[in-house]
Image (tube, rainbow, N blue to C red):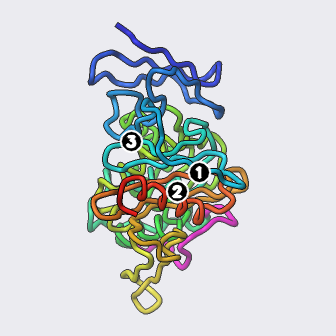
Amino acid sequence: MWLLLLVIGGAGAKYLLSDTADAPVVRTEAAPPGPLQDSGTAPLAGGGTAPSPLAVRLDLPGDPVKIKFKKPPKSALLFDLDTGRVLYRSNPTEVRPIASLTKMMTALVVADRVKPGSKVLITKEALHYEAGGSAIGLLPRGRWIGVNTMLYGLMLPSGNDAAIALAQRAAGGSVRRFVRYMNEKADQLGLVCTRFSTPSGFSDKDNHSCAADLAAIGRAVLRQPRLARIVKEREAILPFPIKGGKLYLYNHNPLLRQGYRGTTGIKTGYTDAAGQCLVATARRGPFKLGVVLLDSPNPGKQAMQLLDRGFKASGSA
């Protein structure tokens, strides 16, 4: 028996959820940008009900954190990383461009498909990353770089060149095939408002998600020890075949840069269309919280305000 039929954005994607615990989410076509409709009975993003264990609990009312921003983000979410309980929400299922937050999924797919210790070829395509975007820089064409170094370059300085090289390495040279893997991973995670068209996120065309889905992706990143070690670092010194054999990388995460206590990750993003975006996580004692901000006027400050109130509400101020 089918319990729920969701129609996203009128003529958009349709999803059927079975009343069995292991029922898959069926995606018939890509969801267009626009707000999701709230059924009033179940969370709509991050996996619906049972299909995704990483779904945030949008079905539970009574968020304990109350805050009024003078200039609010277009979408925001504060949640418990362990339980998925939502502590604060503002338009959490509104579908929006996500800029380089896309690279969280790129890292997950690479971690699935490229073994630690592998090497990544620096191709001509990787060096022709989109003009104006962030990059590692200095990558020598035709040389092989360790995948760990490239993952640091992807997640700390948000290198578009790293995204392309890693995508080609994980998908037999084809960025298009890698994007297909990204969307397959989104299906596996039960995401309902996410669609990828690029491994870098520099282009916003047909590349979008929502705060609730991004919370689920962030939880998946931190459950990958290989990635969790990377995203918590403020800076890194890594093996490199030129420039004295060392590559120095610095994290764009404003919480790490400002020394916010307990910060554990994860990723920043910016384009003109997406605005300033952030998925940030922190730990205080046994409490682990995450925040997603999309198109925020000051993501570092607003994330710290939300986390401070979240830890206070959790009893670990």
Picture coordinates of residue 77 (x, y %)? 52, 46
Instruction: Indicate the quadrant containing the N terminus: top left, top right, bottom left or bottom right.
Output: top left
- For the residues marked 3 and 2, what is the alpha-carbon distance in whole angstroms? 14 Å
- Tag in front: 1 or 3: 1
Picture coordinates of residue 263 (x, y %)? 41, 67
Q: Name the residue under label 3.
A: 85
For the point 45% across and 61% down, which residue is it? 266
Please state the extent of the stretch shown in magenta in the rendering: 129-144
**Residue 5 seen:** yes
Residue 252 figure quarter? bottom right
For the point 64% across and 65% down, which residue is it? 133
Q: Which amino acid does label 2 sit on?
A: Leu
Mark 1 vs 2: CB contact within 8 A: yes
Establish if 238 lies above or below 131.
below
Q: Regarding mark 2 in the picture, which secondary structure is present there? A: helix
Q: Which amino acid does label 1 sit on?
A: Ile
Q: Regarding mark 1 in the picture, which secondary structure is present there? A: loop
- For the residues marked 1 and 3, what is the alpha-carbon distance in whole angstroms? 17 Å
Main SS, magenta residues: loop
Residue 30 figure quarter? top right
- For the residues marked 1 and 2, what is the alpha-carbon distance in whole angstroms? 8 Å
Left or right of 272: which side holds 124?
left
Q: Name the residue under label 1.
A: 67
Q: Name the residue under label 2.
A: 306
For the point 55% across and 24% down, which residue is it? 38
Instruction: Indicate the quadrant containing the C terminus: top left, top right, bottom left or bottom right.
Output: bottom left
Q: Regarding mark 3 in the picture, which secondary structure is present there? A: loop
> Mark 2 or mark 3, which is nearer the start of the sequence?
3
> Mark 3 or mark 1, which is nearer the start of the sequence?
1
For the point 55% across and 23% down, which residue is it? 13
